[in-house]
Image (cartoon, coloured by chain):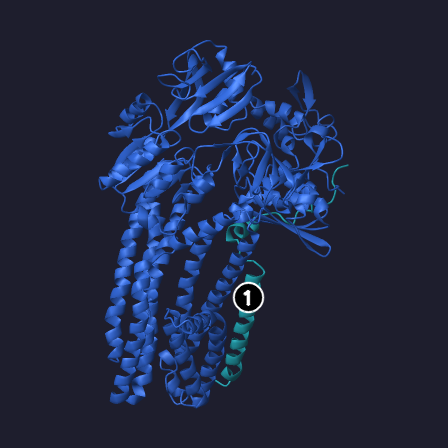
Chain colours: A blue, B cyan
């Protein structure tokens, strides 16, 4: 048996078997086989013609380095390491124990398709302790169950890492569990309503076709009792939320849609059972089971669609646990001068503990700096993009990210009480107020329900005077027909289909009403770098000595920025750097050999012109800096840009370009793309100002950017679309996020939004028209309850089908945009 | 015609059994992730379990 710590998947590793086995696949050579391939200056044996062909194919493609890499154990195996959260002490916080067994839910990244999910499941199930490994592709969650306790977690994490997946404990599991339960309940109610509806329809078919007049009352009674049993199941199980909702509303002395619904359902069910029990039904009196079940089924279908959409949005809400770092590093004085470091869960920190936070990590709780100084990013709390310096004695809020340096801090407050805890609540509230927002409908609806009840009552009184035996039937018909089901279905149905159409092209909505707000826009404002152009990764030194490359490489060390990576990729050896500091959106500063250098925007480095400038501090010069070298990054237009812009122009929106880059380069791009409105050298505030000007000119603006250095502009535009989901801001606050970095998703989203608006308007008009036209007919006694339920059903169906057509609109748009 | 006296209650019973089966399927999470389950049929789960050590 494999042991827990074995890293080898099911097959024997090729490298160990290569000495005696097939050079390509590692399997043993069959006796008598003499095939060889010329590799590594020697004739290596292969086991079959297939492997021989594979070897030559790789060689022809210039890919034979595969064999060398494989021998070195590069590729996946090299990444097999145990992340900090997997240490048993920390992992104990994330697992749930159930007797002999333990469970863990992990969020996996690196899942692309069903095959990846299969690999993760099978790769883990080869570990002897693992009982069950199940991947949910849609939520990228891995549910694990094994015998034992947290001591098995390192082996599991190591195996996942060896398979090429990045795993971290899935947080906000409690909320996800709630959503899962709600989804299951909704589905069970809907499915049971569907089954019961079909059965009752079948049983009442005889009644519709008037076959019952030939039957004896006993048979009729039997058929009706069968319906009654099924209808009871439906009323007590599937329709339960309507009765509960109505009861809650009445207790608070309010009218919601549940009240007339529950009334209609209760009346229809009660009256039918009464008719049946008194034997009047068997004599030919009409029962309402058919109307009742159809009504319930369509109501539930509408609610299910709405809940699905709500859950989809809820999944992107961060909770406290999502925002906390996975681990914290606690220092413990152990008698001697040396501090012992231990990795703990952030929630295990208590006031007075000393922690160590280094560059790139976030601070887990409210703390006071003891030693060290660093620049911290607090933008999630204050909205300030500028990094804030903090030194000994300063307080640091939870969730701040350390940009440079290392801080030793004392914990002031446990993580569960800090400012971080307030954030998810705020975000969720902001989302809730916007998602699923239907202010106009809500206002109309409240009066509508009262109106509906009054009309039903009025109709009942009228008919009691005219023809008392018909009064009940007419009250029921009026209650059902006046139900604004189609009206309440219209918006969620259209939104769901719209959201799904967008999802197919990698677009996710940040808010429920993003699409409706996108439809009326008149101007698209684009960011340049990362949106229209992409750095090619190459840099040229246009001024200064070649030795400057070594300095730049040193200054950009460990900095995560596309431009920094281009400097880091240089072959020169970097000298040591100290006091390295990043000024977001400007550049870096650092000390090399006792001289202070700056690398970044010309103005930041005390120079004129364009490009990226490296300068040295020089107190005697007027600007305080002397230029050492100047670099130009090369960038290229992304291939799909002209097509995407042409599509946007065809949709009749104005285009504008806002960039922080030098005006010359912005002008060049604008000229190439035929953009008339453009602005260069725009700071984040400048972009906001420009957006304000466009807005004042009466434009409704969609801002498209990558969210990395234009977060304020993204937040300040009427509607924002973040291209690429790398930045946290893009994920948390943008109205739409395009996971596929493709500018054509912008005209696609706009097209879908406009179709959605058209269909939504038509749907609302139709649904309102139906109710207005049908109510008088019902009051006049021209509509029987079953006809009312049918009418209600049909109007809901029409609304649903019409909304579903949005998917076809999306397909057409996709075909037009992605022709190739 | 008399057979209906047996058949109709029987059909109702069958429906109740079907409802119970559906509830079980929902509550055991079979509808939680439809994307993944659609692909599961294509997997060769009847191959010998890799848990048995196959290295020499």
Q: Split into 4 quadrants, where in the image is the N terminus of chain A?
A: top right
Query: In the image, is residue A707 above or below residue A39?
Result: below
Nearer the observer, A110 or A448: A448
In the image, farthest residue toward the top: A545
Question: Residue A694's x, y, as percent?
Answer: 25, 37
Q: Say left or right for A422 vs A674.
A: right
Q: Say left or right for B31 vs A284.
A: right
Question: Residue A120's x, y, as percent?
Answer: 61, 43
In the image, farthest residue toward the front: A393
Chain containing mark 1: B
Q: Split into 4 quadrants, where in the image is the C terminus of chain A?
A: top left
Nearer the observer, A816 or A390: A390
The tally of labels here is: 1
**Residue A302 lies in quadrant:** bottom left
- Residue displayed at 71% across by 45% down: A152
* Residue A56 visible to the viewer: yes
Query: In the image, is residue A454 above or below residue A217?
Result: above
Secondary structure at badge 1 equals helix
Query: In the image, is residue A596 above or below residue A717?
Result: above
Nearer the observer, A158 or A510: A510
**Residue B55 lies in quadrant:** top right
Q: Say left or right for A19 vs A447.
A: right
């Amino acid at each position: 048996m494999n042991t827990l710590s074995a890293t080898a998947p099911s097959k024997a590793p090729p490298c160990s078997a290569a000495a005696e086995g097939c050079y390509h696949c590692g399997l043993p050579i069959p006796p008598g086989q003499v095939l060889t391939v010329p590799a590594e200056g020697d004739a290596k044996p292969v086991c079959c013609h297939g492997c021989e062909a594979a070897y030559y194919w790789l060689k022809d493609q210039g890919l034979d380095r595969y064999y060398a890499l494989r021998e070195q154990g590069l590729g996946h195996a090299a990444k097999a390491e145990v992340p900090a959260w997997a240490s048993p002490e920390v992992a104990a916080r994330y697992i749930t124990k159930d007797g002999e067994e333990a469970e863990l839910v992990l969020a996996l990244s690196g899942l692309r398709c069903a095959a990846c999910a299969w690999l993760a499941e099978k790769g883990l199930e080869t570990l002897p302790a693992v009982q069950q490994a199940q991947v949910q592709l849609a939520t990228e969650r891995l549910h694990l169950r094994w015998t034992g306790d947290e001591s098995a977690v390192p082996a599991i994490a190591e195996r996942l890492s060896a398979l090429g997946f990045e795993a971290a404990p899935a947080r906000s599991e409690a909320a996800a569990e709630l959503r899962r339960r709600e989804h299951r309940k909704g589905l069970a109610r809907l499915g049971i309503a569907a089954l019961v509806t079909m059965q009752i329809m079948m049983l009442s078919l005889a009644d519709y076709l008037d076959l019952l007049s030939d039957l004896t009352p006993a048979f009729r009674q039997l058929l009706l009792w069968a319906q009654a049993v099924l209808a009871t199941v439906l009323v007590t199980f599937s329709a339960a939320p309507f009765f509960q909702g109505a009861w809650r509303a009445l207790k608070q002395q309010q009218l919601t849609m549940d009240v007339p619904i529950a009334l209609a359902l209760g009346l229809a069910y009660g009256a039918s059972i009464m008719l049946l029990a008194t034997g009047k039904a068997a004599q030919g009196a009409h029962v309402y089971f058919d109307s009742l079940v159809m009504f319930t089924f369509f109501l539930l279908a509408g609610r299910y669609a709405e809940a699905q959409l709500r859950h989809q949005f809820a999944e992107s809400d961060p909770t406290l646990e999502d925002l906390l770092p996975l681990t914290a590093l606690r220092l413990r004085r152990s008698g001697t001068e040396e501090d012992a470091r231990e990795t703990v869960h952030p929630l295990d920190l208590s006031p007075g503990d000393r922690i160590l936070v280094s560059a790139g990590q976030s601070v887990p709780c409210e703390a006071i700096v003891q030693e060290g100084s660093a620049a911290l990013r607090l933008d999630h709390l204050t909205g300030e993009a500028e990094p804030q310096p903090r030194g000994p004695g300063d307080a640091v809020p939870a969730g701040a990210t350390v940009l440079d340096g290392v801080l030793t801090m004392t914990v002031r407050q446990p993580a569960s009480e800090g400012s971080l805890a307030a954030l998810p609540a705020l975000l969720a509230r902001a989302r809730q107020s916007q998602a699923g927002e239907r202010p106009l409908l809500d206002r109309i609806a409240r009066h509508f329900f009262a109106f509906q009840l009054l009309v039903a009552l009025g109709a009942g009184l009228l008919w009691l005077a005219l023809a008392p035996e018909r009064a009940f039937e007419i009250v029921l018909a009026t209650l059902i027909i006046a139900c604004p089901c189609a009206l309440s279905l219209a918006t969620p149905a259209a939104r769901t289909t719209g959201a799904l159409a967008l999802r197919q092209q990698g677009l996710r909505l940040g808010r429920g009403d993003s699409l409706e707000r996108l439809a009326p826009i008149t101007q698209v404002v684009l960011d340049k770098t990362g949106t229209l152009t992409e750095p090619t990764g190459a840099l040229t030194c246009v001024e200064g000595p070649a030795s400057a490359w070594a300095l730049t490489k040193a200054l950009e060390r460990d900095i995560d920025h596309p431009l920094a990576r281009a400097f880091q990729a240089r072959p020169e050896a970097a000298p040591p750097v100290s006091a390295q500091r990043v000024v977001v959106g400007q550049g870096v500063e650092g000390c090399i050999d006792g001289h202070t250098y700056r690398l970044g925007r010309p103005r930041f480095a005390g120079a004129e012109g364009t490009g990226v400038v490296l300068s040295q501090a020089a107190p005697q010069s007027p600007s305080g800096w002397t230029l050492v070298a100047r670099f130009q990054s090369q960038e290229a237009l992304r291939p799909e840009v002209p097509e995407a812009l042409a599509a946007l122009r065809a949709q009749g929106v104005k285009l504008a370009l806002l960039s922080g880059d030098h005006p010359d380069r912005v002008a060049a791009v604008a000229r190439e793309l035929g953009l008339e409105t453009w602005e260069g050298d725009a700071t984040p505030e400048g972009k906001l100002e420009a957006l304000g000007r466009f807005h004042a000119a009466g434009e409704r603006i969609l801002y498209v950017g990558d969210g990395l250095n234009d977060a304020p502009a993204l937040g300040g535009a009427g509607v924002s679309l973040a291209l690429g989901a790398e930045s946290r801001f893009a994920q948390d606050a943008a109205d739409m996020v395009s996971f596929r970095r493709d500018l054509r998703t912008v005209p696609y989203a706009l097209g879908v939004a406009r179709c959605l608006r058209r269909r939504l308007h038509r749907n609302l008009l139709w649904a309102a028209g139906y109710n207005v036209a049908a109510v008088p007919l019902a009051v006049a006694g021209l509509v029987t309850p079953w006809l009312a339920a049918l009418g209600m059903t049909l109007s809901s169906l029409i609304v649903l089908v019409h909304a579903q057509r949005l998917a076809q609109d999306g397909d057409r748009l996709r075909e037009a945009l992605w022709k190739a | 015609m008399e057979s209906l006296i047996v058949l109709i209650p029987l059909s109702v019973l069958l429906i109740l059994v079907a409802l119970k089966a559906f509830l079980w399927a929902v509550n055991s999470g079979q509808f939680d992730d439809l994307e993944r389950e659609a692909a599961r049929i294509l997997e060769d789960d009847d191959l010998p379990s890799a848990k048995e050590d196959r290295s020499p």
